[in-house]
Image (spheres, rainbow, N blue to C red):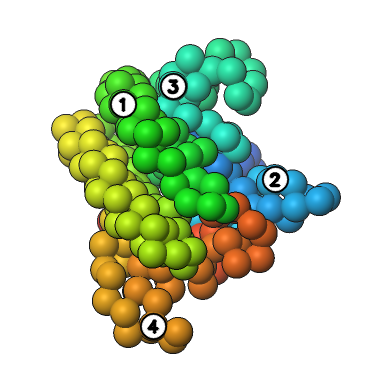
Amino acid sequence: MLRRSMILTTLGALVLASAAATPAQAAEEETYYLALGDSLAAGAQPVGEGNAVVATNEGYADQLYAKLKESDPNLRLVKLGCVGETAKSFVYGGVCGYDGAGSQLGAARNFLRKNGAKVKYLTISIGAQEVYGCITPTGADTGCMLKGLASAGLYMPQVVGGIKLAASARTRLMGMNWYNPAVAAWLLSDDGKNQAKQSQLLSGTLNLKMKVNYGAWGFKLADVCADWRCDDWTEDTPFNWPRNVWDLMTRTWMPNVIGNWLPKAHGYGYIADTFAKVSS
C-alpha cells in the first residue's frame, strides 16, 4: 500500500507540475510579427464617414499574418503602422503617438530590444508617402515628387539602419517597394500619358533607393512594383490600357474615390502575397 501511495503521489505531483508549466511554456513559445510603416502598413482605406481614410484590419499586414499563422499558431501580430507616416516622421515622430517613445522608430526599437529573437518577422513600407502627396486627380506634380525623393533618400538609411541595429539576427526583415499610383495620369490626356511615364522614371529612382537601403541592411525586398507590373506599358488589357494602369485601377480605390490611391482589400492581398514569397 505504501508503494502504491507513493506512486499515486508522484503521478499527482507530475500532473500538477505539468498543468502549472503549461501557461509558462505557452508564453515562451509565443512569437511576433511586427508590422511597421505608413498608410499601407496600417491597412488604410477610404471607408470612414465621407470617405475618410482610416486604418483597417484588411491591410497587407493582416493578410500576411493570416498566412504565417497557419504554420505558426503561436504567432502574434503587432501593428505600429501609422496613416500618413513619412520616412522623416517615422524617425522623428509627429503623426502618430506611441507609449514610451517619441516616434514609430523609437517604439519599434523598444519592442525589438524587449522581445529579441521572439520577433520572428518584421515588415515595413515607408518612403513612398513623401511622393504620394504629389499625385492629384489632374496628374502628378513632378517637381513635388523630386522633393519627396530627396526626403526619402535622406531618411531611409536612418529608418532601416535603426531597425536593423535593434533587431535580433534571427528576425526576418522585409521591406517593400511601391507601385506608383501616378501612372493613372495615363488615362487623362496625351499630356497625362507623358506625366505618367515621367512619374514612373521618378518612382524607379525611389524604388532603387529602397532596394539599396534594404539590401545594405540585410532586408529582403518584397518587389511589389514587379507584381503590379509598374514598368509594363503593354496595351493589351481590357480598354487597351497599359498593364500597369490596369493593375492599379483594378486593385485600388482610384476609380471609386477621386484622388485616393490606397489598395482595396484584394489589392492588399496582392502585397501580402509578395511579402509571403520572401518570408521563408
Q: What amino acid is at disc 3?
A: Lys
Q: Which residue corresponds to mark 2? A: 54
x and y percentages locating residue 229 in the rendered image: 31, 67
Q: Examine the rendering and report whether any part of residue 62 can be seen.
A: no
Q: Which residue corresponds to mark 3? A: 88
Q: Which residue corresponds to mark 4? A: 240
Look at the numbered disc 1 and give the secondary structure of its residue. helix
Residue at far right of view: 49
Give the Cα distance between marks 3 and 1. 11 Å
Q: Which mark is residue 150?
A: 1
Give the Cα distance between marks 4 and 2. 33 Å
x and y percentages locating residue 168 in the rendered image: 31, 30
Q: Which comes before the other along the chain, label 3 or label 1?
A: 3
Q: Nearer the viewer, mark 3 or mark 1?
A: 1
Q: Which comes before the other along the chain, label 1 or label 2?
A: 2
Check the image and report above or below for 98 versus 7.
Answer: above
Check the image and report above or below for 268 versus 111.
Answer: below
Residue at point 44%, 21% (across, down): 88
Whether pointer 3 and pointer 1 mark residues with C-beta atoms closer than 8 Å, the reply is: no
